[in-house]
Image (cartoon, rainbow, N blue to C red):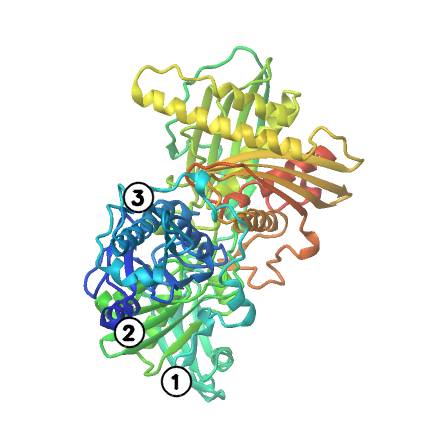
Amino acid sequence: MKLSRRAFLTSSTAAAGTAALVVAVRLYGPFSSGHKHGAGDSPYDTWIQLYPDDRVELQLTKTEMGQGVFTALPMVLAEEAELDWSKVSVVQSDECTSTGGSGSVISSYLPLRRAGAQVRETMISAAAHMWNVPREECIAQKSCVTHRHSSRVLTYGSLVERARRTPLPDPMRVPLKASGEFTLLGKPLPHLDIPDKTTGKARFGLDARPAGLVYAVVAQSPVVGGTLLDFDASEASRTPGVLQVFEIKTSEGIRQVAVVGKTTWAAMQGREALKIRWSPGPHADESTETMMAAAHAAFEKSPEWTWPTPHSNAHSTGVVRQVDSVYEYPFLAHAPIEPMNTTIHLQGNRCEVWAPSQNGTGTRSAVAKELGLPESNVKMHLMFVGGGFGSRFNRAYVVQAAQISRKVESPVQLVWTREDSMARDEFRQCGAQKLRGSVDGNGSVVSWNCHIVDTSVTGPWGMPAHAWEAPDLDPFLYPVPDLGYTYTQIRSAILRGAWRSVSESFNGFIVESFMDELAHAARIDPYLFRRRHLASAIPVLKASDQAAAGKEEQIRRHAKALLAVLDQAAEKADWHKPLGQGRGRGITCWRAYDSYIAVVAEVTARKNSFHVDRVVSVVDCGQVLNLNGVKAQIEGGFTFGLSAALREAITIKNGIVQEQNFHTYQLLSMPDTPIFETYLVDSHRDPGGIGELGVTLAAPVVANALFAATGKRLRRLPFRLDEASL
């Protein structure tokens, strides 16, 4: 990975006299770290810089999208390095790798701890050398090293020059602090980026303003896969503020029209004035109705693919009730507040890019490929992201911006309007799942079979269609003797992509709703029903070979952790306390991203409307980094999922997206949000992910609560009580 220009200048200045200690770390891929002194090829993507005035700057390779990585990850470094938190700042590294999948903390925790321990131990060694004392007599605290016997103190800043000449300890052997010694991790700290965002100092993608900037929009076929026949730019060119109108072409050969103006508004008005004709193309007959009809027709045919399952197909002879259900879920848009945008300035064989991206290196690669440049000739500036949720992996608008930059001498900012961003989104897939399950006379689930039919998230990416569609079957959430999952893909030209929590969003809904159905079929309290099945997985440990024993131990670990959060959620929510008429409670649990969550919700139903009143969540995400950040992510994620469950759906008619702005694609509003109570399990295992965890249970816990309140089962998203079945 190339060393960024910013890091090179900082390191060069340090070598010339500022004397900063620069420690380079790799967070993406195999861990490595070391001193950094100059430019050239580098295996590193993150830099820790300690200055003589005690300031510490972390140049971080993750994108800040409001999820709090600009605070949580510096906390890890500060904890292990024994830094004074008030001296720590964070800067967006231009070498930004993929940020998504709730993986930033999981992938960065141990590397940053090791790098922090290297800093701490190097400072102790430097101080011991200056005092000529054994290093064992020195202790580091709050950016200072103290000699225990003489009480002499040296600040980290005063030790920088000596530390620069001190070899870093082996990162794989450097001693790490015990969790009981943590003084910063687990505390509720305000996010470091909030002041700049509050005052307007923070710069998002739309705030990029290189000198001479002009603005562009692109006219694209309203029908997915449609092609340009011809256009007349005469009126558009005469629109005040319009500078240029010209044709561009995608890598697939799809023709489009770019309009460049002095302002975004001028470009938009110029686009409105275009006289343009489109051929609808081969997908004009696609609609939500045809896709859902295809899904239901597929249930009557043999599936395309079958998952291998970890359980034997043993059948119980005591089956007392069988339950058959079909669940449906629609396309969903990401709908971030900041629309898609990229700013590019092409000058000869060099290019500069300003982008709010979840994958800066991927954005750079896409620009370089489109322009035929070496990646080293493309300079990236990663900006704050005004909402991602998976949408900033989309590179279609990045490629368009690169194409436009060829014909514009000055920097150009391409903006997808709200309508562009909605209509051209890479949606969460739509589909349906048909389940058949049975319980025996003892109230145990003895069979669970599911046929998934949907448009697949992975189809447009060229990966196997079955890769991400089903829950993690190995092991399944609950022990089931006869477990089967099959899959059939609906072919569609509608683009799909990673939507926050990806398949967890609808699989969580379906698994935990159907588990509730089976509990009521067995006539057992839904909480006790789940508890019984999780508890039955704990005594396993029967395997003789090592691989099987490891699998059984994994099942035990998952079951114990889920059981713990489930019990605590039921207790905190007063599960057994009666509610009034028209009110109900639902309960759910889930595991994902190396974390565990249980949620209880209370609802009030009135005729064909309802309100979610209270949500109690218990989360085991391992070691908590920033208490404020974790709670915000769980509650924000739940609200995100609740909005989708109650309001959101993208529908297709004649190959055209019908919902293209917030008046038709409605989001949850403040009066509709519940009261939250969020509790975190005291755990010191390595941290799991939380950014998408809260999304998973919003739909099923509300559906289960509504069943308790009304006796109506909701199996189609978004919810409508008048469509529910008794």
Give the class, few, some or many, for how many residues have Cα within 10 Å of label 3's Cα (few <14, many ≥20).
few
Seen from this angle, which residue lies furthest left? 40
Give the class, few, some or many, for how many residues have Cα within 10 Å of label 1's Cα (few <14, many ≥20).
few
Seen in the image, is 78 located left or right of residue 292?
Answer: left
Query: Which circle marks residue 212 in the picture?
Result: 1
Circle count: 3
Q: Position of residue 200 (x, y in %)?
A: 53, 72
Q: Nearer the viewer, residue 184 or 335?
A: 184
Q: Is residue 300 above or below residue 505?
A: above
Please say if the residues under marks 1 and 2 sit with CB atoms less than 8 Å apart.
no
Q: Amino acid at mark 1?
A: Gly
Mark 3 and mark 2: span between their CA atoms? 52 Å
Q: Is residue 642 above or below residue 235?
A: above
Q: Residue at x 51, y 50 (%)?
A: 331
Q: Residue at x 49, y 26 (%)?
A: 559
Please tell me in which quadrant of the rendered image residue 359 appears: bottom left
| Disc with the residue nearer the chain's start (3 vs 2) | 3
